[in-house]
Image (cartoon, helix red, strand yellow):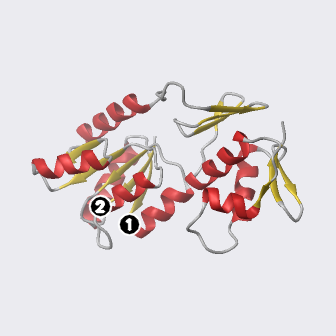
Amino acid sequence: MKICLIEDDLKLGRALHAALVNAGQQATWLRNAADARHWLCEDTFDAVLLDLGLPDCGGLALLRQLRRQGLAAPIMIITARDALDDRIECLDAGADDFLVKPVATGELMARLRAVMRRVTGTRVAGAPVWEVKDLVLDESARSLMRAGVRIPLSKTEFDLMHALLRQPDRVWTRRELEAQAMPHVEGPVLDAHMHNLRRKVGGDYISTVRGVGYVVRR
């Protein structure tokens, strides 16, 4: 699994990161909410381990923000707080599990496996699936497959492909795509995202219409 660990405590963060790596996981360790927002927007993770006591933003506020922004990955809270009200508030805000410190490595890995079993392969019945050539985008699972192989996408990359694939042969202007996928981002970053998408998906799927924008042809 590819896991994002968000923990500001240096000693505990090192221990958890080492435990994850030793268990064969690919782990990225971040120590504040600002870095977490950036990484979770730009990369795709199978699961998130989130501490509530971050220095620049409460973990609960970050959890709510990530869910509002459409992050679909399971989020497990790891905290020293053990009050029932804290557990209920986090679960209601979108957490998938709640683990109280100190954390036993064996229990952590078992909880992660259990969370992944609950979410892997599940989708909302009747939710749209968009298919163009050998690309298949599942809207509810927020997944993109090419010839049966999953392509890891960031949130912004997925939103861009969602727009392009749900209306193939339509030329999307740059402004329309920016409004769809990055309404709160300032600056000319669309081209960078499209470059990354072409690298991941393949250059033949997305065409540039000079002076206008981008299109996916059937």
Q: In this view, does 144 lie to the left or right of 201?
A: left
Q: Measured from the top left, where is residue 163 in percent x and y?
A: 68, 47
Local crowd at mark 2 within 10 Å, few (<14), some, or many (≥20)? Answer: many
* Outermost residue to the left: 83
Query: Which residue is painted at 32% across and 69% down in the image?
Result: 57
The residue carrying mark 1 is 33
Q: Position of residue 99 (x, y in %)?
A: 21, 45
Quadrant of residue 10 within the rendered picture: bottom left
Q: How far apart are marks 2 and 1 (CA)?
A: 8 Å
Residue 64 at x, y percent in the picture:
35, 56
Q: Position of residue 16 (x, y in %)?
A: 31, 53
Kindly indicate the quadrant of the structure image that contains residue 81: bottom left
Is mark 2 in CB contact (under 8 Å) with mark 1?
A: yes
Front position in the image: 16 or 126 = 126
The residue sitting at the right extreme is: 210
Quadrant where the C terminus is found in the figure: top right
Can residue 100 be seen in this snapshot?
A: no
Q: In this view, does 11 lie to the left or right of 64?
A: left
> Is 46 placed left or right of 135 in the picture?
left
User: In the rendered image, is residue 7 in sight?
Assistant: yes
In this figure, which residue is indicated by the disc labeled 2?
59
Q: Is mark 2 on a helix, strand or loop?
A: helix
Above or below, 88 relative to 139:
below
Residues 129 and 155: in front is: 129
Kind of residue at disc 2: Gly
Mark 1 lies on a secondary structure that is: helix
Left/right placement of residue 16 relative to residue 186 reads left
* Residue type (three-letter) at the residue carrying disc 1: Ala
